[in-house]
């Protein structure tokens, strides 16, 4: 049994969908952040898989994945800092309580 | 054959972890499951022959981000109110959206269903290093700036007192 | 000297001179600038005489033609492209040679004469500029080979005539007369213009030789030739004061007398005759046009002569006389007397210029035009009296003077063509003798009727008498010189195409003698009426024939009818204006305005009710949609926003993927 690109893509898609579902449903801000990380990982899997199957011997896709990891790290850092600040101000971590945007 | 077994094992770890991240009530548990899932993804990278990415994934995600999140959860203190529902009311709608997206993705995935490769895995670290400091030097420098900005931003936002 | 090759200089030199005079010096009653004009015309005279002499002894070959390219233009006619070439050039035939000499000579003498006559006039300098300009235009008309250029010069001489008749425009009469002359001649020019258009549309060229060739080869339909001939005749009638357009010439006498001598006796009024002569080949192709020319000339000769009989204004008598003599020429041309007509033109130029200049001399002395206030002036101005007598004899046709040769030629020619015309012309000749001697008797003999004026009268200065002397000599000798060995006929002749010349009668011998006998009787009758000291018989006659006299003094009511015509035009214009302002404007302008306003208001209503509402509703729609959407996700929930976004994006992605 040989693994095809399709396997990895299906896996990536599944991971992405789980992340999406989490981002849409988790009440906790940190849960949302974690779900987003899952989606990033799904994308990274796709990048690595495409690199492996379509450009064997190349590294461009992996490099891109590395950039994604870096950006994700930065995002998490800033996101967590924001979460902490918000929590310090409003003592809640549930997004439905963040309704400052309500018009 | 061994590749397939490894793939399925790692896929099972990653997906199980992911589902747990989304479904568990306790945020700490979720964070731990996240670490598990990320580790599974790292294993998948290994399966794909991306050695440097595998290392990077372990170091940054599992060793960095997951731990950071766990710390954050702990800092939030009361955040893990276990008697409260951690899923909001729109889960059905979210499921529908996910289904539609999944259908679309399925169609796209179908294009590559039979694409396979027999290239042997080679060490990529050297090539990535050359690429980073060669063609991608400018994005590389830019990403360092982004990291610096993120660092500064994090420090700025999480200061105790803004005066 | 290559006089003929440089003939184009003849019109150009006076033109340059006129601009120099006009622009180079300030206005000054004693300006020396006229000498420039005299020098210019002097050179032209020398050159003209040289050409004339060369033509007489046969050293130069005429007709001489020289063309330079002027412009060309393309046109598409009936789908075919044509290129029209419009050259500008000179055409010197016998008639042109003679005309050049006539114009230059009279112009030169008049300019010299004007030194004395116009001396001290505040616009002395301008007067000379105008004279030079007129001379240039007239010479251009004479030498041009292109009918278009001829037409331009034709209009320019008309314009010069206008400004010179109205030279003393401070007074009302000259201004009125100038206007009248200009407008009346324009009426004739309309016909000329149409004729030119016809010529170009048929021939495709304005070059006279080409048109002549076109006609000679028989391409010109008889109807077109008639139309063109009549159109040209119309123009000529305006310019040469033929019936019924001669009404402007008597009034043109309001201008300075030397101007009358130059323009309204010798040169410009001859331009019409010259034009007919220049286009004679067209008349040769159309008997009807020829017939019209002959009868117009004859009628003019008779009517003008009768009107001269009752006139007391010395210049107007001469003006009517001019009209009458021009009628002679026209009639001669209409009777195939090409040579006779132009011969009379030449001799007439000399003696009529002489008579006008004499009249000018008299007017200069007594400061009036009215012959009833003169009398016995031969005592005071013997030289002028002598010159006038010579001129009168010449115009009357006393044997061996210039007028005798030319008039005899005309009468003979006319008799050969049509005896009826001959009788009219003979009657005119008799009347001419009568009124010319009446002029002489009233002016120079008898008793002095106005002592005040008589006492102030004096002989004119040498600048005026010398030209008189020269012209008098020419009046005496030119006829004999030009008819010696048929000199003029050799120089100026028209060879009719074979078969076109009509059958001629044979003039009986002694015809001239009979006419002269009648003329002599007329002179005696004139002496009986006016030569003595009392005019009782004349007054008696006048009383008895009062209706006739009245008719003649009113100029056959032609002026009145023309004025009525003008008045009618005026009224028509006024009515048209009224219709325009009260009806057309009201309906089509104001009404249109109203309609436009109504339409605008309707549009505004539509705009307010429909367009604006649509705009408002579009805005309202987005407000409503926004409101509805706000209601839908009114709680400000980030995850709800996220869900909507994800839903839309996923749907789009799905649609694109499964397309």
Image (spheres, rainbow, N blue to C red):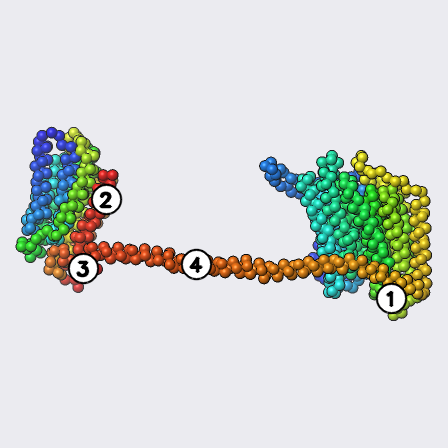
Mark 3 closeness class: few <14, some 14–19, many ≥20 residues within 10 Å = few
Tell me if label 4 and label 3 are in contact, CB under 8 Å. no
Q: Secondary structure beneath disc 3?
A: loop
Q: Is residue C4 visible?
A: no
Query: How many angstroms separate mark 4 from mark 1 (CA)?
Result: 80 Å
Labels 1 and 3 within one chain:
no
Query: How many angstroms separate mark 4 from mark 2 (CA)?
Result: 46 Å
Query: How many angstroms separate mark 4 from mark 3 (CA)?
Result: 51 Å
Labels 4 and 2 within one chain:
yes
**Where C191 sits versus B130, above or below?**
below
Tag 2 residue: C652
Residue C217 coordinates in the image, percent (x, y): 74, 34
Q: Residue at x 10, y 53 (%)?
A: B72
Q: Secondary structure beneath disc 1?
A: helix
Residue C454 versus residue C53: which sits nearer the camera? C454
Which callout, 4 or 3, points to the residue nearer the camera?
4
Q: Residue at x 46, y 58 (%)?
A: C599
Which callout, 3 or 2, points to the residue nearer the camera?
2
Q: Earlier in the sequence, mark 4 or mark 1?
A: 1
**Where C140 sits versus C468, above or below?**
above
Residue A90 versus residue C52: which sits nearer the camera? A90
Chain of the residue where label 3 is placed in the rendered structure: A
Q: Earlier in the sequence, mark 1 or mark 2?
A: 1
- In this picture, residue B56 sits left or right of residue C216: left
Tag 4 residue: C602
**Where C47 sits versus C247, above or below?**
above
Which label is found at residue A100?
3
Labels 4 and 1 within one chain:
yes
Quarter of the figure with residue B13: top left
Tag 1 residue: C373
């Amino acid at each position: 049994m040989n693994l095809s690109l399709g396997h990895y893509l299906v896996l990536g898609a599944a991971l992405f969908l789980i992340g999406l579902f989490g981002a849409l449903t988790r009440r906790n801000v940190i849960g949302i952040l974690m779900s987003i990380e899952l989606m990033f990982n799904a994308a990274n899997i796709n990048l690595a898989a495409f690199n492996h199957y379509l450009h064997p011997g190349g590294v461009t896709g992996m490099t891109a994945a590395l950039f994604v990891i870096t950006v994700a790290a930065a995002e998490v850092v800033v996101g967590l800092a924001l979460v902490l600040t918000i929590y310090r101000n409003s003592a809640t971590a549930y997004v439905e309580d963040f309704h400052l945007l309500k018009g | 054959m061994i590749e397939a077994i490894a793939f399925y094992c790692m896929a099972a770890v990653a997906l199980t972890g992911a589902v747990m991240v989304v479904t568990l009530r306790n945020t700490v548990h979720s964070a731990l499951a996240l670490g598990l899932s990320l580790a599974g993804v790292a294993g998948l990278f290994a399966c794909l022959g991306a050695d440097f990415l595998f290392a990077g994934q372990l170091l940054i995600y599992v060793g960095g981000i997951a731990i950071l999140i766990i710390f954050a959860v702990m800092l939030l203190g009361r955040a893990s109110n276990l008697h409260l529902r951690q899923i909001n009311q729109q889960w059905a709608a979210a499921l529908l959206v996910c289904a539609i997206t999944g259908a679309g993705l399925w169609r796209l995935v179908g294009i590559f269903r039979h694409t396979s490769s027999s290239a042997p895995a080679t060490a990529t670290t050297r090539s990535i290093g050359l690429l980073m400091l060669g063609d991608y030097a400018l994005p590389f420098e830019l990403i360092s700036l982004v990291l610096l900005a993120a660092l500064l931003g994090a420090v700025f936002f999480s200061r105790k007192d803004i005066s | 000297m290559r006089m003929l090759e440089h003939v184009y200089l003849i019109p150009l030199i006076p033109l340059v001179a006129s601009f120099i005079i006009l622009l180079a010096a300030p206005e000054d009653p004693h300006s020396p600038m006229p000498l420039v004009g005299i020098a210019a015309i002097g050179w032209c005279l020398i050159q003209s005489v040289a050409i004339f002499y060369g033509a007489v002894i046969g050293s130069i070959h005429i007709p001489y033609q020289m063309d330079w390219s002027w412009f060309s233009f393309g046109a598409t006619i009936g789908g075919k492209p044509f290129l029209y070439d419009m050259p500008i050039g000179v055409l010197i035939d016998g008639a042109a040679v003679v005309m050049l000499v006539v114009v230059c000579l009279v112009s030169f003498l008049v300019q010299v004469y004007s030194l004395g006559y116009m001396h001290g006039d505040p616009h002395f300098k301008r007067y000379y500029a105008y004279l030079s300009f007129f001379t240039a235009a007239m010479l251009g008309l004479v030498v041009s080979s292109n009918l278009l250029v001829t037409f331009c010069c034709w209009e320019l001489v008309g314009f010069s005539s206008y400004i010179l008749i109205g030279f003393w425009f401070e007074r009302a009469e000259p201004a009125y007369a100038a206007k009248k002359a200009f407008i009346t001649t324009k009426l004739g020019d309309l016909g000329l213009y149409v004729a030119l258009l016809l010529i170009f549309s048929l021939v495709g060229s304005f070059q006279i030789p080409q048109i002549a060739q076109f006609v000679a080869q028989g391409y010109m339909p008889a109807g077109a030739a008639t139309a063109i001939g009549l159109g040209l005749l119309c123009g000529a009638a305006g310019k040469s004061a033929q019936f019924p357009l001669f009404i402007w010439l008597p009034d043109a006498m309001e201008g300075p007398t030397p101007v009358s001598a130059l323009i309204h006796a010798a040169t410009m009024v001859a331009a019409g005759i010259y034009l007919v002569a220049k286009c004679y080949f067209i008349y040769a192709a159309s008997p009807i046009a020829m017939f019209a020319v002959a009868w117009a000339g004859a009628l003019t000769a008779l009517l003008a002569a009768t009107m001269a009989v009752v006139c007391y204004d010395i210049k107007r008598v001469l003006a009517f006389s001019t009209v009458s003599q021009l009628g002679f020429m026209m009639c001669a041309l209409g009777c195939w007397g090409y040579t006779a007509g132009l011969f009379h033109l030449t001799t007439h130029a000399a003696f009529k210029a002489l008579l006008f200049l004499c009249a000018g001399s008299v007017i200069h002395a007594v400061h009036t035009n009215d012959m009833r206030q003169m009398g016995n002036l031969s005592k005071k101005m013997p030289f002028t009296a002598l010159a006038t007598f010579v001129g009168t004899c010449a115009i009357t046709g006393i044997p061996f003077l210039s007028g005798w040769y030319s008039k005899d030629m005309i009468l003979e020619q006319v008799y050969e063509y049509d005896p009826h015309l001959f009788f009219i012309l003979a009657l005119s000749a008799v009347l001419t003798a009568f009124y010319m001697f009446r002029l002489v008797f009233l002016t120079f003999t008898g008793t002095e009727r106005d002592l005040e004026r008589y006492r102030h009268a004096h002989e004119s200065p040498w600048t005026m008498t010398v030209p008189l002397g020269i012209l008098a000599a020419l009046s005496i000798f030119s006829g004999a010189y030009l008819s010696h060995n048929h000199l003029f006929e050799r120089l100026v002749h028209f060879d009719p195409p074979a078969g076109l010349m009509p059958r001629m009668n044979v003039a009986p011998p002694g015809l001239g003698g009979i006419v002269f006998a009648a003329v002599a009787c007329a002179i005696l009758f004139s002496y009986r009426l006016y030569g003595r000291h009392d005019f009782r018989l004349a007054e008696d006659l006048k009383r008895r024939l009062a209706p006739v006299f009245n008719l003649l003094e009113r100029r056959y009511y032609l002026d009145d009818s023309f004025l009525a015509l003008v008045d009618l035009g005026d009224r028509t214009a006024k009515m048209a204006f009224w219709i325009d302002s009260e009806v057309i404007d009201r309906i089509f302008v104001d009404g249109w305005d109203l309609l436009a306003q109504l339409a605008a208001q309707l549009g505004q209503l539509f705009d307010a009710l429909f367009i604006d509402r649509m705009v408002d509703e579009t805005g309202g729609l987005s407000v409503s949609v926004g409101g509805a959407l706000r209601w839908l996700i009114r709680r400000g929930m980030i995850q709800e926003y996220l869900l909507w976004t994800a839903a839309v994006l996923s749907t789009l992605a799905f649609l694109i993927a499964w397309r």
